[in-house]
Image (cartoon, rainbow, N blue to C red):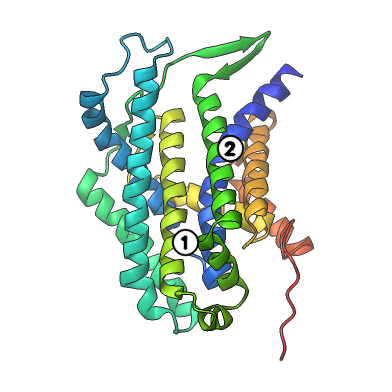
Amino acid sequence: MIQFLQQLINGLALGSIYALIALGYTMVYGVLKFINFAHGDIYMVGAFVGLYVTPWVWKVIPPGQDPSKFNWNTTAGGLVVMLISMVVCAVLGILIERLVYRPLRNRPRLTVLITAIGVSIFLENFGQYLFGADPKSFPDILPDRTIDIGDLSIFMNQIVVFVTTIVLLVALRYIVMKTRMGTAMRALSYNTTAASLMGINNDVIIAFTFGLGSALAAAAGILNAINYPSIDPLMGILPGIKAFVAAVLGGIGNLPGAVVGGLLLGVLETMVVGYISPMYRDAIAFAALIFILLFRPNGLFGKIEKEKV
């Protein structure tokens, strides 16, 4: 039972990261009806921004001397690093939308899809040129502590992942459901033409959607680097694909579905590692995708859309 609970905690921590990336996929799909396959590489950029920003933040907010003890300076520094990374990646996402996707908005979806793959490859190769192809060690920006509850161990990094993910999800729901920008996003997802006729600036809303999704991907990159402190320019490929699977699993275009899909995929992956073999940890994501497409093509929370022919 202890092993099951331990794997469940590990899976929820991993699934929280998948959920944050999947939200970017599902928001862009909900508004534009296409998959931004460069999204996983924004996650990579977020981790590298955190890597290079951390020394500068530490000059302003010196970390605690004992890494095993809680320290407000260390916590504040880690929060600042994440916020800077989110802002940088939000700007990058807006630039990609403005320079690459906007000119192709009225082109066939296949053209945009191929372009998205091209942007992904460009970011990966440019990252290798800019940062180097060798893995980099991410600095410790959180206390290295473990909370023991009987035989169950919860790492401080996992608690930070849970809390940060919940805060970001609550903030995202507030933005989407309670703000004018969120109302415009929902209107745009229903009918682009009608939203434009009602006075909504589609270009601004789409750019905002890209920026918001990219900021969440950057947060996921920082959280993943905190848990697995080795980053490289190709680190976004597999998590990006798995997050896409999570978005499809929950119902592409559905925000709660993306969260549930990410958590479910993370738990499945860790259970396979713990009870079967680490060799199959990546296969489970694609097996889940095949299964859901066979028996529920619209995902767990997706709705069947009827099209007139």
Quadrant where the C terminus is found in the figure: bottom right
Residue 101 in view = yes
Q: Percent x, y for residue 203?
A: 41, 73
Q: Give the answer, above or below, for where 214 lies relative to 29.
A: above
* Residue type beneath disc 1: Thr
**Secondary structure state at the residue bearing disc 1:** helix
Q: How busy is the neighbourhood of tag 2: few (under 14 within 10 Å), some, or many (20 plus)?
A: few
In the depicted view, which residue is nearer to us: 263 or 163?
A: 163
Q: In terms of image quadrants, where is residue 49?
A: top left
Q: Are discs 1 and 2 less than 8 Å apart at CB? A: no
* Drawn side of residue 201 relative to residue 135, left or right: right
Q: Give the answer, above or below, for where 87 lies relative to 30.
A: above
Q: In terms of image quadrants, where is residue 229?
A: top left
* Drawn side of residue 167 relative to residue 232, left or right: right
Q: Percent x, y for residue 300?
A: 74, 56
Quadrant where the N terminus is found in the figure: top right
Check disc 1 and report the residue beneath it: 209
Residue 277 in view = no
Q: Give the Cα separation between the discs numbered 1 and 2.
A: 20 Å
Q: Percent x, y for residue 295?
A: 79, 61
Q: How busy is the neighbourhood of tag 1: few (under 14 within 10 Å), some, or many (20 plus)?
A: many
* Drawn side of residue 218 relative to residue 242, left or right: left
* Residue type beneath disc 2: Ile
Q: In terms of image quadrants, where is residue 304?
A: bottom right
What number is the disc on residue 194? none
Point out the tag, 1 or 2, that comes first from the N-terminus: 2
Q: Give the answer, above or below, for where 158 lies relative to 191.
A: above
Check disc 2 and report the residue beneath it: 166
- Residue at image coords 39%, 31%: 79
Q: Percent x, y for residue 104?
A: 39, 79
**Secondary structure state at the residue bearing disc 2:** helix
Q: Residue furthest bottom?
A: 309
